[in-house]
Amino acid sequence: MQLSDEIRTIATIISPILSGLSVYFTRRFWFATNRPIVCVKIMTAQSGNRNNCYNLVVFNTGNRPALNVCLYAEKKDINDILLENINPQNESLVNGIKRCFSKDTVIPLLINGENVSNSFGTTGHDGVLIYKSKLKIKINYEDFYKNKYSYEQILVVTTSEAFADSSWSKLV
């Protein structure tokens, strides 16, 4: 057997292995990039000189729909972002915040590029949230292939209109 025959034999053995690896990595990278990516942000719904009102917004920034999106937070962590002496008439705001992280609250379908929101309390005069407080949450969801995803994220109770807490007022 000559050297050129040995090279041909080695190439014949290696080429299906390389083809198999190529298929494996192509499929793996396709699933890594073509999937839902869900993130959550506290956004300002309205702001005024007495109160800021917030929404909790869930985004799907991936390129596939997300199914069965659930948000979880520990009760202690939720209580840490709430003021201690809340006006009893604002108890419905507190219950609304807690409902966002209930096991019974599920977003059944979140289309890619879309978002969904829920009211999320107020800061300021007679508010229920502590401004600049942080809440650790866990986001669970799946895709159409039944792949499950789970991530932790930190939410910050702050205005979404200005990242350093100051902005120009809008002229009417």
Image: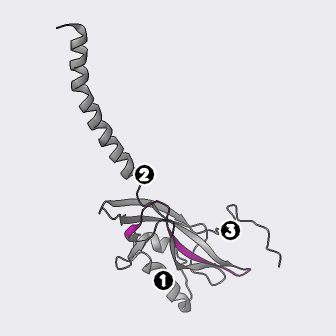
Q: Classify residue 139 as left or right of residue 147.
A: right
Give the percent coordinates (x, y) of residue 112. Answer: 47, 65
- Callout 3, which amino acid? Glu
* Label 1 element class: helix
User: The residue under label 2 is which amino acid type?
Assistant: Thr
Residue 122: say if magenta. Answer: no
Q: Is residue 171 above or below residue 38?
A: below
**Element type at mark 2:** helix
Asked whether, in this view, residue 138 is left or right of residue 9, the answer is: right
- Main secondary structure type of the part rendered in magenta: strand
How dense is the environment of label 2, judged by Cα within 10 Å: few (below 14), some, or many (20 and up)? few
Reading the image, the residue beneath label 3 is 161
Check contact, mark 2 vs mark 1: CB within 8 A. no
Which amino acid type is marked by label 1?
Gly
* Disc 2 from disc 1: Cα separation: 34 Å
Check disc 2 and report the residue beneath it. 33
State the CA–CA distance, disc 1 to disc 3: 23 Å
For the point 29% across and 32% down, the residue is 18
Instruction: Please state which of the two labelled residues, at mark 1 or mark 3, is closer to the viewer.
Output: 3
Mark before the other along the chain sequence, 1 or 3:
1
Position of 138 relative to 79 (above/below):
above
Q: Is residue 54 magenta?
A: yes
Q: Residue at x 37, y 66 (%)?
A: 141
Q: Residue at x 58, y 73 (%)?
A: 130
Numbered circles on residues, count: 3
- Counting residues from the start of the chain, the first of labels 2 and 3 encountered is 2
State which region is magenta: 48-67
Task: Give percent across and percent down for residue 67.
Answer: 37, 69
Q: Quadrant of residue 15?
A: top left
